[in-house]
Image: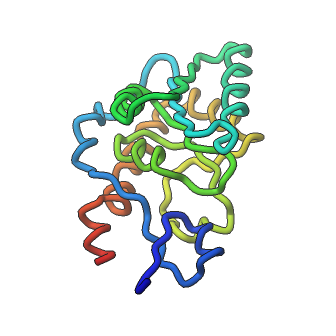
Amino acid sequence: ADRMLVSTPDLLEIVPEATLSPQVVEISKFESLRNNIKTNKVLTIAHAPTRRNTKGTDAIIAAVKNLQTQGFSVVLDLIEDSSPEEVIKRFSKCDVGIDQLLSGWYGKAGVELMAMGKPVLCYIDSRFKKVKADLPIINVTKRTLEENLIQLINNREQISKIGEESVQFAINNHNVDTMVEDIL
């Protein structure tokens, strides 16, 4: 091959001669879904695991149940076995999304959520933070997830602020038109 591309920085450790080429979306497709980045009365969290054991889904379910038991107003929309169109529809109704808690970088779900102006919670490995210094993702682990969700519940204005930053980040870093042109 004349050039190899990888979509996540951890893969550069396996293929150091590759070029990091982030996942892309058609940004214009998400403009009508931004809903002025408003929030629901009950903090609505979306999570769409492709495989639960690689995303930390059990820990996410446990954290939300624990917060509900403590009286926090929060609900989890666990999106599984759904069409891509259904996933996008349900993402558009959430306040925030959780991508994953294990692998150390965000994926397509995180990109789509950011393009809609939804804050993303995701584990970002410290080795990769330098890749995108302006990454608006809320860095969480299994141990910090509840604390981060409580902060969002208690400071709803933060959701709108991070949502706006997320849209701009998605436009700058994941827009198919711009990224394909850069790669070519």
Q: Is 90 or 144 nearer to us in this picture?
A: 90
Count of labels in the image: 0
Q: Relative to residue 156, is residue 115 drawn left or right?
A: left
State the quadrant of the C terminus. Answer: bottom left
Residue at 71 percent across and 31 percent down: it is 58
Can you give x and y, in whole percent of width and height, for residue 71 in the image?
A: 68, 13
Q: Position of residue 112 (x, y in %)?
A: 39, 45
Question: Is residue 125 depicted above or below 43 in this figure?
Answer: below
Q: Residue at x 41, y 38 (%)?
A: 160
Percent position of residue 120, x then y? 51, 43
Location of the N terminus by quadrant is bottom left
Quarter of the figure with residue 38: top left
Q: Residue at x 48, y 47 (%)?
A: 110
How are the residues colored? rainbow
Q: Is residue 93 left or right of residue 110?
A: left
Taking the view exactly as shown, the residue that stands out farthest to the right is 143
The location of residue 59, given as percent across then percent down, is 72, 33
Q: Residue at x 36, y 59 (%)?
A: 174
**Side of 117 where 124 appears, left or right:** right
From the viewer's side, name the closer residue of 9 and 155. 9
Q: Nearer the viewer, residue 71 or 5?
A: 5
